[in-house]
Image (tube, rainbow, N blue to C red):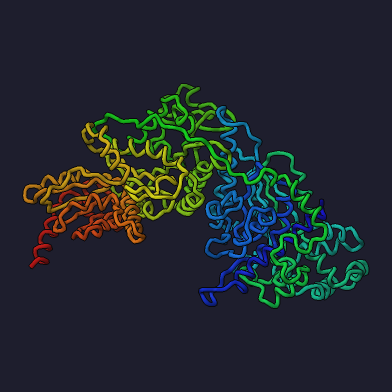
């Protein structure tokens, strides 16, 4: 077996380097001399680790987050196994080719976790393990073998704070079945890693309950240490500064010999140990670190028999066996044509066989038989599907005055009372704001999740509390610490449960709306993986008046509009929220074709995640008669409907989104005395309106002349002479674009600067989003139009 592993390791080393070389030096370029890129040195340091894991240790139930810069190794591995095409390999980093970094959604091969946003793929494995435990505790879930969630980590990635936030969360939730393998090559993009980092890494992981396994020396080095004088060589290696070791690796055997003799001197046994090896053999010995030694790696992996989280710190050589080995500039460096020719000769690959999966292999039949029996690949690609769970319909509330945030809690509480499949599949999570985002009633009914039952001490001691919280395997809420990155990573992992584990979950997370931005990188990462979840940002805007600018969001509406894979809504009223939430449960589970709906031109059949921006401000609700109105329901989901339909001689339209609805309605009533046929447009999703508008324009450019979006349909009957006022508790750009749909003169009202403390009326007046400001804007627009017409 060891011989076959060595064969595969060398094939991966060659193919990963060749993929990058072809993309940069051989493939025709349309962009002149623009560098395509790739990371040949980072690939070389990973080939032994990935060979040992994928071809020896892993099983089909295991999931792996591959270090981003080892993408060519991953694709080469899948190519050898028949899961990747030659065409895509030849087009690495090109249009339609293999991706720069492993991607679940854009690569055809079997990617478990998209990686590329530094450190996030690492942390995702921990949260995926927690999701696996959650499902294992549920009676309704299929009984599957528990897999290991494995991250292949570059040592420089450990500078990322999200890695350590994740460790603390894992410790709190009794993390298990998680391996991180650190490619400790001690080089980053800009230099060499500082001395002693491995000791800090070991101490941190040990403190959080992980097993740490340091793989410093390969079998050749360990054998040499047993020879006379070997103890002195071992001490020299372990004391050698990282920059020196890297430089000597680059310079080769003669440089190693000179430096060793200079430092150690002629000490008899040590000199004999060195002299009995040629320069090439000495170079091989000094490059035989634990992470580049298949026997060392497989033995270390085989030795772990339990589910304790384990980190392997594997010493490696960046650029191992290539002309780039050890050079401090090798991170983004590329072998030039002469270096590649030298490397090709060293690897024994004949011209014309560069793309052959098993080139240089003499016993191909034996190797092919071995590959056919590799456990990890034995079941083919490991993407699951899960059946859709149906909703029993919206939960409508009869409160006359209530906020959308409070309404969200009551709607979830109503769902919690149901005994159906959708309810049991909902799992909520929040970063220490469960109560203040109104998840409390849901948790009271559905409890918190833990693998082992933990009673509620306050309840046992008869201390009154509104929070009747108990931890149990049946619980349906993950209580997290305040790190928003962890929240988004948890939502991403929960939102992939159908694909990773074959079980449908409906994840709902809550967070204070301004702190959406704290977790934005992880939110983007979750959407890029096509994870499915609902994120509720609440409370939002300057409407959270007494809390001041630090807790008042401004640009989150624009985040919702610009984030791919995420549909954002901002309802003003409870009935809107009920309809949107019920629609969202279905939308999360869709996986249809990418064809647009020719009514809205939105690609709803593909599904996605949902962002709800809610408010703490209680407002008087609309009448209940519209609940059964199909046009109203459709408008809420499509993004907007006429709260007050404009007449044929409309002079003014007020379009609002969110909690400023009462101000828009009041202003329309006041302006109505001297303006004709005023329209009030209730926008529930600027995101969907804008997306439909741009999609319809693209469709028309492609020949669909009758393509009309929702916002074009709504504004189409409004006179071009009418003026438009848009207003929202957020950035004015959220709605300002509506004026461009049909060329209406527009006054966009909103918030562009950090908030203040005060009352809601104080702040609305200061930022000019109150009824007076809307009336004044109407007057200014009217005056401006008269001047313009003259």
Image position, residue 649 (x, y; %): 10, 51
Q: In the rendered image of this protein, does residue 164 appear above or below residue 478?
A: below
Q: Is residue 207 left or right of residue 361?
A: left
Task: Tell me the residue at 33%/46% (across/down).
Answer: 540
Q: Is residue 103 above or below residue 255?
A: above
Q: Which quadrant would the C terminus be assigned to in this image?
A: bottom left
Name the image quarter holding residue 508.
top left
Q: Is residue 64 above or below residue 269?
A: above
Q: What residue is at 42 percent from the left and 38 percent from the top? A: 586
Query: Looking at the image, which is closer to me, 622 or 579?
Result: 579
From the viewer's perspective, is 638 left or right of 25? left
**Residue 783 percent across, percent down from the top left:** 10, 61
Q: Is residue 316 left or right of residue 631?
A: right
- Residue placed most toward the observer, 551 or 635: 635
Residue 307 in picture, x, y percent from top left:
68, 39
Nearer to the camera, 111 or 281? 111
How many marks the image carries: the answer is 0
Asked whether residue 476 is in view, the answer is yes
> How far from the left and from the top, in percent, is residue 339?
70, 75
The residue sitting at 58% across, 53% down in the picture is 108
């Amino acid at each position: 077996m060891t011989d076959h592993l060595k064969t595969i390791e060398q094939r991966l080393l060659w193919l990963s380097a060749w993929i990058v070389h072809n993309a940069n030096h051989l493939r025709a370029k349309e962009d002149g001399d623009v560098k395509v890129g790739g990371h040949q040195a980072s690939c070389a340091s990973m080939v032994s680790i990935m060979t040992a894991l994928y071809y020896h240790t892993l099983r089909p139930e295991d999931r792996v987050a591959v270090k981003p810069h080892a993408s060519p190794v991953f694709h080469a591995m899948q190519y050898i196994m028949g899961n990747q095409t030659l065409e895509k390999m030849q087009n690495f980093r090109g249009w339609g080719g293999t991706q720069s970094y492993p991607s679940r959604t854009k690569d055809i091969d079997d990617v478990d976790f998209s990686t590329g946003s530094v450190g996030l793929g690492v942390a995702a494995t921990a949260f995926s393990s927690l999701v696996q435990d959650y499902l294992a505790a549920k009676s309704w879930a299929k009984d599957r073998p528990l897999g290991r969630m494995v991250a292949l980590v570059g040592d420089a990635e450990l500078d990322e704070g999200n890695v350590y936030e994740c460790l603390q969360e894992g410790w709190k939730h009794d993390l298990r079945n998680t391996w991180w393998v650190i490619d400790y090559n001690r080089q980053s993009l800009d230099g060499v890693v500082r001395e002693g980092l491995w000791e800090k890494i070991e101490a941190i992981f040990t403190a959080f309950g992980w097993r740490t396994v340091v793989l410093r020396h390969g079998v050749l080095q360990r054998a040499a240490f047993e020879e006379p004088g070997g103890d002195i060589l071992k001490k020299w290696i372990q004391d050698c500064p990282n920059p020196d070791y890297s430089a000597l690796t680059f310079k080769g055997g003669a440089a190693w010999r000179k430096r060793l003799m200079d430092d150690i001197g002629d000490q008899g046994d040590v000199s004999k140990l060195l002299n009995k090896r040629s320069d090439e053999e000495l170079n091989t010995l000094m490059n035989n670190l634990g992470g580049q030694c298949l026997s060392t790696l497989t033995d270390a992996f085989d030795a772990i028999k339990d589910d304790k989280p384990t980190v392997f710190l594997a010493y490696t050589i960046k650029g191992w066996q290539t002309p780039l080995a050890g050079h401090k500039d090798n991170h983004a460096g590329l072998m030039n044509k002469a270096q590649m020719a030298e490397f090709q000769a060293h690897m024994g690959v004949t011209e014309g066989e560069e793309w052959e999966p098993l080139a240089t292999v003499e016993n191909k039949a034996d190797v092919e038989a071995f590959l056919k029996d590799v456990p990890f690949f034995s079941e083919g690609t490991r993407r699951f599907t899960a059946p859709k769970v149906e909703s029993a319909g919206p939960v409508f509330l009869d409160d006359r005055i209530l906020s959308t945030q409070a309404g969200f809690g009551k709607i979830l509480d109503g769902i919690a009372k149901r005994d159906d499949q959708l309810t049991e599949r909902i799992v909520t999570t929040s970063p220490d704001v469960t109560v203040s985002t109104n998840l409390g009633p849901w948790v009271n009914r559905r409890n918190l999740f833990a693998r082992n039952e933990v009673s509620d001490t306050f309840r046992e001691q008869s201390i009154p509390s509104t929070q009747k919280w108990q931890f149990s395997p049946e619980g349906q809420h993950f209580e997290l610490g305040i790190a928003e990155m962890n929240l988004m990573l948890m939502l991403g992992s929960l939102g992939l449960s159908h694909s990773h584990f074959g079980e449908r979950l409906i994840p709902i997370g809550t967070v204070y709306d301004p702190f959406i931005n704290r977790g934005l990188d992880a939110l983007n990462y979750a959407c890029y993986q096509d994870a499915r979840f609902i994120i509720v940002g609440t409370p939002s805007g300057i409407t959270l008046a007494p809390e001041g600018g630090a807790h008042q969001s401004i640009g989150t509406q624009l985040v919702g509009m610009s984030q791919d894979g995420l549909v954002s809504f901002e309802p003003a009223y409870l009935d809107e929220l009920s309809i949107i939430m019920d629609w969202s449960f279905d939308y999360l589970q869709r996986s249809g074709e990418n064809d647009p709906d020719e009514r809205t031109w939105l690609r709803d059949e593909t599904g996605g995640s949902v962002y709800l921006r809610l408010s703490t401000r209680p407002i008087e609700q609309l009448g209940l008669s519209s609940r059964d109105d199909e046009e109203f329901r459709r408008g809420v989901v499509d993004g907007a409907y006429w709260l007050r339909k404009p007449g044929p001689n409309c002079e003014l339209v007020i379009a609002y989104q969110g909690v400023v609805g009462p101000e828009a309605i009041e202003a329309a009533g006041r302006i109505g005395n001297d303006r004709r046929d005023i329209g009030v447009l209730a926008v529930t999703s600027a995101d969907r309106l804008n997306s439909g508008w741009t999609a319809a324009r693209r469709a028309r450019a492609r020949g669909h002349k009758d393509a009309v979006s929702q916002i074009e349909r709504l504004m189409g009957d409004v006179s071009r002479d009418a003026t438009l006022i848009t207003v929202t508790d957020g950035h004015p750009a959220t709605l300002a674009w509506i004026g461009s749909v049909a060329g209406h003169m527009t006054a966009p009202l909103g918030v562009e600067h950090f908030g203040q403390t005060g009352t809601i009326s104080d702040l609305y007046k200061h930022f000019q989003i109150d009824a007076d400001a809307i009336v004044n804007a109407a007057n200014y627009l009217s005056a401006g139009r008269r001047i313009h017409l003259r």
